[in-house]
Amino acid sequence: MNKRILRLIVVITVLVLVAILIRTLQGPTLVSTDRGYRQVMGTFAHIIAVAPNKKTADDCVEAGFEKLRYIDQMMSDYDPNSELSRLNRQGFPGPVKVSQELFDVFLASVNYSEKTNGAFDITIGPVVDLWRKTEDTAERPGKEALDAAQKKVGYEKLTLDPNARTVRFAIAGMKLDLGGIAKGYAVDLAVKAMLQAGAAGGMVDVGGDIRCFGAATRGRKVWTIGLEDPATEGNVMMILKLNDMAVATSGDYRRFVLIDGRKFSHIINPATSTSAAQLSSVTIIAPTAIDADALATALSVMGTAKGLQLIGSTPRTEAILISPAPQSIQTRTSGAKKYIKNK
Ligand code: AMP
Ligand code: MG
């Protein structure tokens, strides 16, 4: 054989081998599935799955939504048939045996109550109910009603027995409200379900409580998450780059009532039974969505100084806070910067 042809064959063979090697090192080709938004947990949820093939990616999205629906049915306080609603009816005199998931959320909640000096408190239900009524009446709840409701609030009035997995309320009329933590918990469980179904990566978003993991879409390694500007709806205020992290935002800019032209947040300061007004928006970045969710609600109550102190002593957790308009001053922990794109 002609020497030149032989050399050419060798070169081509080497090139082909190098190409195969690169492809192997890159790992399997991944595809992603995005089936859009669906209504769950009183808001809109969005799941994206990345997997080795389309069928697995589709299955992962469905497994994620299935978990969200399961937790919604269990923890909704709007649904009188949910396990939480039943507990709220029977917790006093109790005790009531509850599912492992509910018990886990209660344990985490009490832990957050202790860490935040009571700023986060799921026994806030009776006071939340009074403020919710203002959505129809546009009038502040009366002092008498608030005082009576406040007597039924306090996480120390909740008895959790881990051995029997039971819950008991110390006084009649107590009501647990998981609005500040259930979405985050559900997001974490959905991520777990997706991993079990074979996801190589994914993103779960339930009304702004988001967790992303593993491979991102279009061969990227990090997920980009847009944060909405509290002052102008629909405007992206900043873009976060996250991987294997969660982010949650609490604030008065989406859900509030107007009374005499003043905004009243749906987040209540348990110490005063009035709506939290110190911050307009609180974004927390943390390893799990349950942590991000509970802390975002807690910091809305605690305000900037105490809030930053707490986040400073919480590992791998960052905060981005915005004070109410018109000042809208942004304060953040020093470590938040590494998650912000182009900053
Ligand atoms: P989020 O949007 O996660 O901040 O949750 C707000 C929801 O948490 C409210 O709509 C209430 O259902 C509930 N909530 C209000 N105040 C508190 C509080 N101080 N601690 C725990 N949950 C609260
Ligand atoms: Mg929350």
Image (cartoon, rainbow, N blue to C red):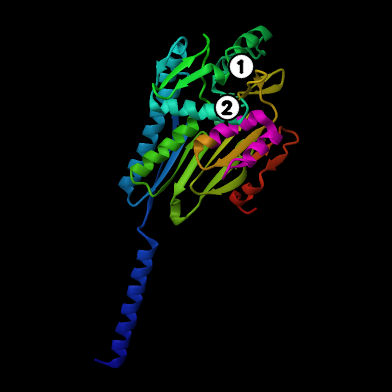
Q: CA distance from mark 1 to mark 2?
A: 21 Å
Highlighted magenta segment, given as a residue range:
292-319
The amino acid type found where label 2 is placed reads Ser
Whole-percent x, y for residue 231 in the image: 67, 35
> Quick one: label 1, few (<14), some, or many (20+) residues within 10 Å?
many
Figure quadrant of residue 330? top right
275 left or right of 113 in image: right
Q: How many marks?
A: 2
Along the viewing direction, whichever of 175 and 278 lies nearer the viewer: 175
Q: Residue at x 47, y 10 (%)?
A: 92
- Magenta segment: does it hold 298? yes
Residue that badge 2 annotates: 113
Whole-percent x, y for residue 283 in the image: 60, 38
The amino acid type found where label 1 is placed reads Trp
Q: Vertical placement of 60 versus 4: above or below?
A: above
Instruction: State which image quarter holds ligand 1.
Output: top right
Figure quadrant of residue 18? bottom left
